[in-house]
Image (spheres, rainbow, N blue to C red):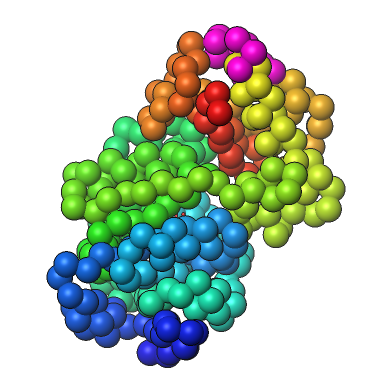
Amino acid sequence: MYEMGRGQTMTTLFTDIQQFTTWRNEIPKHDTVGFVPTMGALHGGHISLMQRARSECDHVVVSIYVNALQFNSLNDFSKYPRTESVDFELCAQVGVDSVLVPLQSDMFISDSPNLLSPSKEAEAFEGTDRPGHFSGVVTVVDRLFAVVQPTAAYFGLKDYQQVAVIRNMATTLHPRIDIRPCDTMRETDGLAMSSRNRFLTETARASAGLIPLALSTAIAHWRNGCRDASEVTAIARSIFDRDASIELQYLSIVKDGTMDQVEAVSERDSIIAAVVIDGIRLIDNMQFSNA
Ligand code: PAF
């Protein structure tokens, strides 16, 4: 256990789930607890989740756990950036009350724990391109929810499909936890903030700027009156086609909050995309709105 003080708030680091549980049990029953689960490598997107939790809840908990169960290759898992001391400092700056960094042996008794089956929302898109990914995500989030027992949990909408899958898992297994999706934070050229952006070379980073351009051009086309999903996606595709280094994995329009593809686009539906640029896989989405 380690503590760091900032103004009124003391941020405590727990690596032991038992000690965390003792701390958690001391929180008065009617206080609200906001929870931001992360894998570390914190960026502006995570900070906005923590700030929202801070402004809405009496207590804020952040977890940092690089979850081996959700990676498709050992190589990806070992390459994932680990920046724990900087992460802890950022949590302290935002006024987070406790940071939980559990050991794998404390999270799961076995090296290959029983995996939960995600809902049907997990089947397509990321589910096809990354088999087993969502099973790993819901297994770890379920375990973290049981430990942290939050009132509300905050997730970034950049991972649109993850939000849909976790929402379904929580409805079944943790109905008292309020899942609060939060807007995607973007760089000045519109690129969605992601822990993977740091792996982009200068050239790949320039190409990545076409992702938000493609999605926002599709939204503009819809605002101009086009409702046909294949026409709207074709406009976005034509922008990706400008750059041969972009390999498009999927591009689709789905019904608000679900993974159901639509033929006619309505307000609140979302356009979702995954691309690979120079070996780095990036995802993004935008919602159709007239605002
Ligand atoms: O979005 C993430 O960082 C992870 O998928 C999550 C929700 C922390 C589960 O490991």
Magenta-span inclusion, residue 224: yes
Against 148, residue 287 (above or below) is above
Magenta-span inclusion, residue 168: no
Quadrant in which the N terminus appears: bottom left
Residue 141 lies in quadrant: bottom left
Is residue 267 visible to us here?
Answer: yes
Is residue 18 visible to us here?
Answer: no
Quadrant in which the C terminus appears: top right
Q: What stretch is highlighted in magenta?
A: 223-235
Task: Tell me residue 49's x, y (percent).
Answer: 47, 58
Residue at the image point whose x is 18% and y is 48% from the top: 175
Task: Tell me residue 164's x, y (percent).
Answer: 37, 39
| Extreme residue in the right direction | 203
Residue 220 lies in quadrant: top right
Front in this rendered view, residue 56 or 43? 56
What main secondary structure does the magenta stretch of the protein show?
helix
Against 214, residue 207 (above or below) is below
Task: Tell me residue 208's x, y (percent).
Answer: 74, 42
Residue at the image point whose x is 53% and y is 63% from the top: 47
Against 159, residue 240 (above or below) is above
Task: Tell me residue 59's x, y (percent).
Answer: 32, 71
